[in-house]
Amino acid sequence: MRVAVVGATGVVGRTILDVMSERSFPADEVVAFASARTAGQEVPFRDGASLTVQELRAEALDGFDLALFSAGGSTSEEWAPRFVDAGATVVDNSSYWRMHDDVPLVVSEVNPNALDGAVRGIVANPNCSTMQMVVPLRPILDAAGIERLVISTYQSVSGTGKDAVDELTAQTRAHSLGEDFPRPRVYPHQIAFNVIPQVETFKDGDDYTTEERKMMGETRKILGAPELPISATCARVPVYHGHSESINVQTREDLSPEAARDLLHEAAGVVVVDDPWQGLYPLATAAAGRDDVLVGRVRRDPSHERCLNLWVVGDNLRKGAATNAVQVAELVVERGLLGRGAVRAA
């Protein structure tokens, strides 16, 4: 099995390679692709070895069974169909394909059977903030139904990429040295020691950002609930790794906090950390480097008898992106969906 990793020099692409190595992904050959600017770089992979990054070119696409993309929407729009036409199945981490009706949007623990609809040969990976949220919501939906969601996110700078991480570091260093803050370049305002109530952009007079729209639309698609009322507010915080979320979930049937904790204890991919009287609850620092989604502060909403509040934290680079992409790729292999012909036949 030959596997391409497109966008291998980015933070998510490098994490995909790390996760493939950690999980002993059954590839006979892995080829790292990126732009001409970074071609020739070495990226680490398996047992201290490295891969030489190749430029993404049309003549290099033949012979791949699987391609994992993390290179941005415009790259995925152009190159994912080319890989499919050359015989590969594509798992894409960009936003471009997520809401296409003929492209399944898959979280491995939540809706793996959606892979049966991968007739185009492309499978989409959800937004990182959506991803970590739907993992604990699935067992609640199955047990008690969900009538409404209200979400507030506190998202780390690594979700924007390496330049954002560098910007936070530079501003923090300037503050500690008593120097003037460098002018913000990645975000519209200073991110160090600040909270910015904008993740991504505002478009066409919409009061909600593109990130907030993603969370609302993608959650409905993944949970198979197209009419589910959802409201999201997304904020950027000066944290390097790990997104935190406050989720208010109104259930159709009564579900006590105790019953919800029992469901979550049994849920795949979830770790319950919920002893607030002892200072135990999910923290971004605790989630960093982990593939599990951490859930705590499970409690009744005193304003509504069928509402629960949850605090959910996950590593946005791992479960929020790279790990789920690799898990989906594992499902593709297990189900015999490698290659365009196999997927379309399914």
Image (cartoon, rainbow, N blue to C red):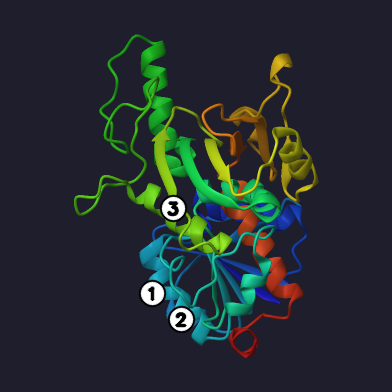
Whichever of labels 3 and 2 marks the residue nearer the N terminus, that label is 2
Q: On screen, 171 above or below 2?
A: above
- Residue 197 point in image, percent of width and height: 34, 33
Q: Which residue is mark 3?
A: 216
The CA distance from mark 2 to mark 1 is 7 Å
SS class, disc 3 = helix
- Residue 329 point in image, percent of width and height: 66, 67
Q: On screen, 84 above or below 145?
A: below
Specify the amino acid type for callout 3: Met
Instruction: Judge from the rendering whether residue 114 lies leftward or rightward of residue 330; answer left or right.
Output: left
SS class, disc 1 = helix
- Say which residue appears at 54% left-offset and 38% top-offset: 247
Q: Which residue is mark 1?
A: 78
Crowding at label 2, few (<14), some or many (≥20) Cα neighbours within 10 Å?
some
Residue 310 lies in what quarter of the image? top right
Specify the amino acid type for callout 1: Glu
Q: Which residue is mark 2?
A: 82
Specify the amino acid type for callout 2: Arg
Crowding at label 1, few (<14), some or many (≥20) Cα neighbours within 10 Å?
few
Pick the front one: 191 or 99? 99
Pick the front one: 311 or 96? 311
Residue 231 lies in what quarter of the image? top left
